Amino acid sequence: MKLTDILNESPQREVGEGGFSRVMTTMRGAIPKIKTIGILTAENPCAQKLTPQENSVRNAKLEKILGSYLFGYRKVKGKYGNMENSFLVNNITKSQLMQLGDEFVQESIIFGDYFEEGDKYGMVFSMIRTHTCDSDEPVGTIMGQRKVFIDRNNQDDFYSEIKGRRFQIPFFEVPTFDDKDGTITKKPFEKIYDTHYDDAEFDGKGGEIKGSYRTYPSKSNAPDKLSDEDKEKIEKLNEQSLDESKTLKSQWEKRGRIMNILNKYM
C-alpha cells in the first residue's frame, strides 16, 4: 500500500473532513471504515456543576489524550438544560471509551456500534454508566439504547450540534411540540400521540426513520401496579432528579429514565 493511501485511511483525517452530513452518514453506519463511535465529555464530573473555566481545562486534557492516541474526533456542542461541550470519537473501543469516562468521572458515555441484520445496517447507540457517582448501579449498566438519531434544528434545548445543525439520540420520550410557538401541546396520560423510539430504526439503506407513535392511556388507566424492583428504581431516580447540585442534563436524564420504566406498563 502506498504511503498516500495509508494517510488517506488514517482516522486523524476525519477531524477536518466534511461537516454535519459526513457525521450523520457516519452515525448511520454508512462509512465502511468507521465501525464504532463514542461521545463523551470531561465536563462536570459526576454531574456536579463546575465553572466554564474549570470545564475548559478538563476538556483540554481530554482532547490532548484523544490526540495522543491518534483518534479521529470532532467537537460537539450541545444544550441539555445547560450548555456542554463533548467529543465525537471515531473507531474507539467500548473499553477505551469507558476507561476515559471513568478517568474523567463521568456518569455515562454514549457508544455507537455498527451492526448488520439482513439487508439492514446502522449503529446501535448505548448510554452506558462509566462511574458509580452517587448511584448503586454497577459500572457498565446500559441506561438507554437506540438505533436512530433525530433532527432538532427547530428546538432551543435538548440537542447536540455540529456545524450549526442540531440533532439528538432520543434515549427518552420526545414530547409533541406545537409548530408555531414551540410549546408542548399535550400532557402525559391524556390520550395523545407522542413519538417514541423503542423499536425505531432507519430503513435498509440507512435513510428514513421507521419510527412509531405511542398512544397514552387516559389518566384512569395509568399504571398502578409496578414491580418492587421498578418502584425502587423510580424512587432512587426521582430523588436524584431533585438534587440541585447536579446539572440540568443529569436531572433530565433521571426523569427520562423514569418515563422509560413507566412506559413498560403502558
Image (cartoon, rainbow, N blue to C red):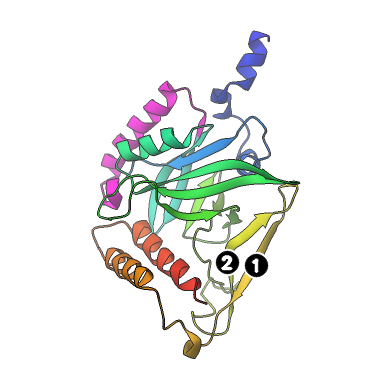
The picture places residue 155, in percent across and down from the top left corner, at 53, 61
Label of residue 244 in the image: none
Q: Residue at x 42, y 64 (%)?
A: 257
| Whether residue 11 is situated above or below residue 53 in the rendered picture | above
Residue at 37% x, 57% y is 249
- Circles 2, 1 touching at the beta carbon (< 8 Å): yes
The alpha-carbon separation of the residues under discs 2 and 1 comes to 6 Å
Q: Residue 56 at what x, y percent from top left?
A: 32, 38
For marks 2 and 1 on the same chain, the one whose residue lies earlier in the sequence: 2
Identify the element where label 1 is drawn: strand
Quadrant in the picture for residue 162: top right
* Label placed on residue 212: 1
In the picture, the disc for residue 196 is 2
- Residue at 72% from the left image edge and 55% from the top image edge: 208
Amino acid at pointer 1: Ser
Residues shaded magenta: 44-73
